[in-house]
Amino acid sequence: MIKEYSIIKYDGSKGRKEVDKVVAETPISIFLNDREYITLLCTPTNKEELIVGFLNSEGIISSFKDIRDMIIDNNGTAKVYIDSQIDFESRYNNRVITSGSSKGTLYAKSMEEAKKRRFPLGDTKLKPKEIMDTMKTFFKSSKIFEETGGVHSVLLKGKDYEVFREDIGRHNAIDKAVGNMIINNKALEDFVIYVSGRLSSEMIGKISKAGISTVISRACPTAMGIEIGRTTNMTLIGFSRGDRFNVYSGEERIDFSSVD
């Protein structure tokens, strides 16, 4: 995950040699049934989870059982063999460049599918103290970020199961966490997702498609992200820092009566 480079650091008065820690980045090309589908840029960990989460997000698989075989080599190639027949051409022609710092692609069709979901509000309530305490712990969990400043983090939190993943890309970090859940046959509907990056439309769309109704971030949402959240009945919380946060949609899932 980390590489070291000799650099010159300037401090305002002079330059000096230092060793700097930098997050590793690698491409992985996914082939579906021996046809090249996409190349993702990612950190070189949890590749199987990344692939499974990404394929689920794009509607290519709905469970881990849809994958007959997966071969990941050391040269950046992943060959995935699936049973289901997908109209790949329509997805190739409707790519959307994501707004992440490490640019990626999503498909317009999968974004439209995400907008069609309607989450029931249900009886599940989150207490503000739980949100703030979890975010404080989550923010301190990324040792890679502390050393390099170059990764995004995701925490999927349920009652009896948690998954923490990090990657250079916000979307990859989500896919890795969701991929872990799919591989372990966990139901995502009962989980809350904490993310380090902004809540842009493709982030909210990816989370919605995974079946997660509540997302909490230290960063801001975008206007389109809010619109998708409100359309799908998601709970969107941004600027969760210290003892404060903003609720942009789905406030019904927050138990404000527990606040003195």
Image (cartoon, rainbow, N blue to C red):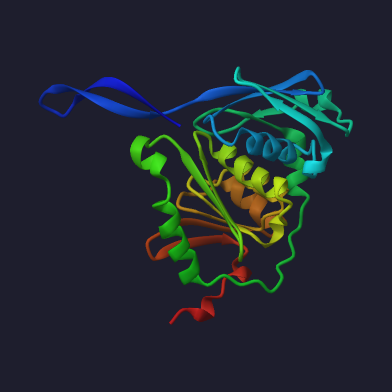
Task: Look at the image and tell me whether residue 179 can be seen.
Answer: yes
Q: Quadrant of residue 189?
A: bottom right
Please give the name of the residue rendered at 41% of the width and 39% of the height, measured from the top-left corner: 144
Q: Position of residue 105 (x, y in %)?
A: 64, 28
Q: Position of residue 49 (x, y in %)?
A: 65, 39
- Work out whether 164 lies above or below 260: above
- Work out whether 234 lies above or below 112: below
Image quadrant in which the N terminus is located? top left
Please give the name of the residue rendered at 63% of the width and 64% of the height, measured from the top-left corner: 250
Q: Nearer the viewer, residue 53 or 257?
A: 53
Q: Quadrant of residue 47?
A: top right
Residue 233 horizontal side relative to residue 9, left or right: right
Please give the name of the residue rendered at 45% of the width and 37% of the height, measured from the top-left corner: 151
Q: Nearer the viewer, residue 259 or 18?
A: 18
Q: Nearer the viewer, residue 136 or 128?
A: 136
Q: Position of residue 212 (x, y in %)?
A: 67, 55
Could you tell me how many numbered marks the image carries? 0
Q: Which residue is most to the left?
A: 13
- Work out whether 63 lies above or below 67: below
